[in-house]
Amino acid sequence: MTDSRLTRLGLLALAALPACMTVRAPTHPELATVAAQGTSLGLSDALETLIASGEDTSTDRAYALQGVRERPADTAQEAYARAAITGRVVQAKGLRGATLVPEIEFYAQRSRELDPNFRGGAATVLLGTLYVIAPATLLKDGDSETGLELLEEVTTAHPEVAQNHLRLAEAYVTLHDPEPAGPHICFCLEHQSELRAEDQRLLKGLLDDAAPLPCDLPADAQ
């Protein structure tokens, strides 16, 4: 198991926080404002906004994780938020966050059970990516083949979403089968403006590992 594989959970949201540890305030006070409004999904979205701008800190991620752990996860939205924030913590900590992987799996599964169509199958994308990237020894109910099936399923259901194609292409490359990743990478190149900055970086990384593509590379990708 390597740090790089866990870092790519982008799926994939510090090592497990000891029960006695309390993060009293985030680096960015807007997270505390959102937390006071009482929704895990709002807290997850606020954290994602900070991550997208490159302004988040490990304290912000720890604060968000603490916040969702204090709330019930009895809706698809709240369960997804807990899985996503936990994934972001694992992403930041790599190996040191490995003990949190089962928590991501549990709450992503829970979100799918409650509403598989929430945000176009967001929990399916998260769970599928987790199954492909995380070592099987950390997982309870799935493996890389299950993950690939989940990502193929959500991409077929929502072929207009560039991120779905990106995660599926990542899965093929990760599983050392780069040829079927080609059309999905091409789709992402054509819709690159729809991808977040971190996803665009992932796309560029996949270009180095993919088989010859069935499309021409844009000038800025050559």
Image (cartoon, grey):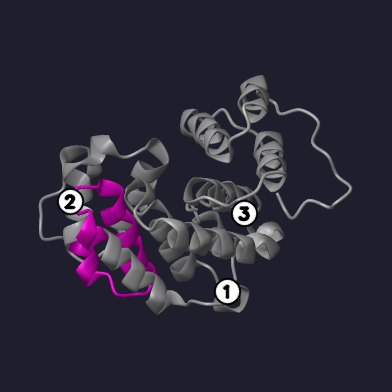
User: Does the magenta-highlighted stretch encompass residue 16?
Assistant: no
Mark seen at residue 90: 3
Mark seen at residue 139: 1
Which is more toward the observer, 217 or 137? 137
Q: Which x, y percent locates residue 24? A: 81, 31
Left or right of 144, for residue 120:
left
Q: Quadrant of the C terminus?
A: top left
Question: What type is the residue that disc 3 sits on?
Answer: Val
Q: Which x, y percent locates residue 5? A: 52, 63
Q: Earlier in the sequence, mark 1 or mark 2?
A: 1
Q: Residue furthest left?
A: 215
Q: Secondary structure at mark 3?
A: helix
Left or right of 181, for residue 206:
right
Mark seen at residue 209: none
From the viewer's perspective, is the residue at label 1 or at label 2 nearer?
A: 1
Residue lying at 36% horizontally and 66% vertically, measured from the top left? 171
Q: Quadrant of residue 101?
A: bottom right
* Residue at image mark 2: 187
Which is more toward the observer, 202 or 160? 160
Estimate how packed mark 1 is, as few (under 14), some (14 to 19) or many (20 or more) residues with alpha carbons within 10 Å: some
Q: Which x, y percent locates residue 180? A: 21, 69
Does any portion of residue 201 appear in the rendered image?
yes
Residue lying at 52% horizontally and 61% vertically, measured from the top left? 110
- Number of numbered callouts drawn: 3
